């Protein structure tokens, strides 16, 4: 099939390259000439494992090209997939890129006789496609929906695993305006992927995407709420609690004698909160959408509230344990919102660093690859903030270290390194990755999320 994809961010480019790999003829469209040139030169403009190699293959085969010319792309394809950004701003989802894109496509469709399907892949609130996008397309093209097709086909791609997730989907959700639209979008996937294709209406497809992210985010906040209760109780370790709870076969079934250990369980672990470009934005967008419809969602609001206070709790506990933060040197281990990415958007580390600086601590924040992105969003005029890639430098003479992102190079730091680099080592384990007993035996004051160190130590 001939497919045009509008937007070459991580969703657009991964979708384009993966569909071209399946044999479709793909044209990627972006307004930025430099991005288009780099893609045509087989250079992946975003980092995703496996993407570079696939891009080289599909460009070599002539299955993918990039252009700034939207009209050419739409006129020469059967379906246009919209994969532009939907940031969150001013208390609601910002649809300006979607609106701009739909307007331009509609104007082009005015002059296109052949049937064409417009498929929204960007994450948008329920009703966006069947009201806003449809209305714009109808007004600008002078045609009625039905004369052109309309679909909503959400993505379920994790950053850092996007190519793997695209190639091995759990389900393919196709929201369709009518049979004809569905049949076209179905042809993109049918026979190419081993996953059930779920046909729904447009707004159900939008709701599935939001519900999926909101559920995972809620599991994280739920775990963090239980962690806080454990901390206040003393002598209860949230890790033991949640590990035991998730051994329930309804969470973790056995095949033969082996536990399946579904990945979903890893969202039921306490930590310092979720971040990234999707969970916070999507949960907030669903809250604002729902409130706009007259229903104030309580669980979703709590999910966000807990996520905002969780990193602050760590800073408070640290301050109490080292007699205030002013003038203290604090090593922050990890700035990216999760390992294997340089993305710092909505990372709990940013909240922690800003709070430490506000309380006049000297912050030595370290990350293997996210330092450059961090430097763009953190204050560059604060002499107390130092960003670096070498954790040993950060630990040198530090009063405390806080593990925020579970990079393997940080989670494998041996206890003797904390002891030899730091004066009176205090370790905040924001991801519960270190062994408390090993750390305490080495003379380290260990403070873990969901664990009151004093009480727990007292009880054995
Ligand atoms: C998320 C979803 O997982 C994808 O299914 C979805 O398609 C994507 O958003 C999207 O909407 O585009 P992503 O933001 O890349 O993908 O991140 P995750 O790997 O799910 O991590 C999100 C947050 O949850 C991170 O802050 C991470 O630290 C936290 N997390 C993740 C955990 O606390 N535990 C985990 O086991 C995994």
Image (tube, grey):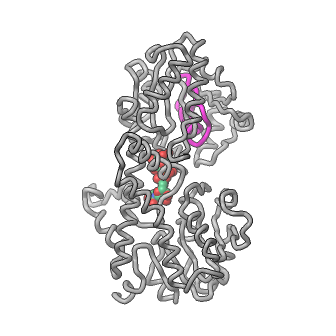
Seen from the viewer's position, the closer of residues 44 and 380 is 380
Seen from the viewer's position, the closer of residues 393 and 402 is 402
In this picture, residue 383 sits left or right of residue 263:
right
Seen from the viewer's position, the closer of residues 41 and 130 is 130
Query: Which residues are the magenta region?
Result: 1-24
Looking at the image, residue 143 lies above or below residue 225: above
**Residue at 25%, 62% in the rendered image:** 248
Seen from the viewer's position, the closer of residues 151 and 198 is 151
Looking at the image, residue 171 lies above or below residue 135: below
Residue 5 is inside the magenta segment: yes
**Residue at 49%, 21% in the rendered image:** 117
In this picture, residue 264 sits left or right of residue 274:
left
Q: Position of residue 21 (x, y in %)?
A: 56, 33
Residue 324 is inside the magenta segment: no
Q: Is residue 12 visible?
A: yes
Q: Position of residue 245 (x, y in %)?
A: 28, 65
Q: Is residue 266 visible?
A: no
Quadrant of the rendered image containing residue 422: bottom right
In this picture, residue 25 sits left or right of residue 176:
right
**Residue at 40%, 73% in the rendered image:** 450
**Residue at 71%, 35% in the rendered image:** 32
- What is the quadrant of the C terminus in the image? bottom left
Quadrant of the rendered image containing residue 336: bottom right
Looking at the image, residue 243 lies above or below residue 11: below
Quadrant of the rendered image containing residue 182: top left
């Amino acid at each position: 099939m001939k497919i045009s994809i509008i937007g070459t961010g991580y969703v657009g480019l991964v979708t384009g390259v993966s569909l071209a790999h399946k044999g479709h003829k793909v044209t990627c469209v972006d307004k930025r000439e430099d991005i288009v040139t780099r893609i045509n030169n087989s250079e992946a403009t975003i980092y995703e494992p496996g993407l570079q190699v696939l891009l080289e293959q599909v460009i070599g085969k002539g299955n993918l090209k990039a252009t700034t010319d939207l009209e050419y792309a739409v006129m020469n394809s059967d379906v246009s997939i919209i994969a532009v950004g939907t940031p969150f701003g001013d208390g609601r989802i910002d649809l300006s890129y979607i609106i701009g894109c739909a307007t331009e496509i509609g104007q082009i469709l005015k002059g296109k006789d052949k049937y064409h399907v417009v498929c929204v892949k960007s994450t948008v609130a329920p009703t966006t496609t069947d009201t806003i996008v449809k209305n714009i397309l109808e007004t600008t093209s002078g045609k009625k929906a039905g004369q052109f097709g309309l679909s909503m086909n959400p993505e379920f791609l994790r950053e850092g695993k996007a190519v793997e997730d695209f190639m091995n989907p759990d389900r393919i959700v196709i929201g369709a305006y009518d049979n004809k639209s569905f049949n076209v979008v179905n042809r993109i996937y049918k026979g190419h992927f081993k996953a059930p294709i779920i046909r729904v209406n447009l707004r159900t497809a939008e709701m599935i995407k939001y519900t999926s992210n909101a559920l995972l985010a809620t599991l994280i906040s739920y775990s963090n709420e239980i962690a806080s209760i454990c901390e206040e109780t003393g002598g209860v370790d949230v890790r033991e609690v949640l590990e035991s709870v998730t051994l329930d076969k309804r969470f973790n079934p056995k095949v033969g004698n082996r536990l399946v250990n579904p990945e979903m369980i890893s969202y039921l672990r306490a930590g310092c909160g979720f971040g990234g470009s999707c969970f916070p934005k999507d949960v907030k967008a669903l809250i604002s959408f729902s409130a706009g419809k007259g229903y104030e969602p309580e669980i979703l609001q709590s999910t966000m509230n807990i996520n905002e206070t969780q990193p602050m709790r760590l800073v408070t506990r640290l301050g109490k344990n080292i007699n205030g933060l002013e003038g203290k040197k604090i090593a922050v281990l990890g700035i990216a919102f999760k390992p294997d990415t340089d993305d710092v958007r909505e990372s709990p580390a940013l909240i922690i660093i800003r709070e430490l600086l506000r309380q006049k601590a000297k912050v030595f924040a370290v990350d293997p690859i996210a330092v450059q992105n961090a430097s763009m969003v953190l204050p560059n005029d604060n002499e107390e903030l130092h960003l670096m890639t070498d954790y040993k430098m950060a630990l040198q003479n530090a009063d405390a270290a806080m593990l925020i992102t579970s990079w393997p190079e940080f989670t494998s730091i041996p206890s003797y390194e904390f002891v030899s680099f730091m004066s009176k080592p205090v370790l905040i384990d924001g991801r519960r990755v270190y062994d408390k007993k090993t750390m305490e035996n080495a003379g380290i004051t260990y403070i873990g999320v969901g664990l009151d160190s004093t009480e727990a130590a007292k009880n054995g």
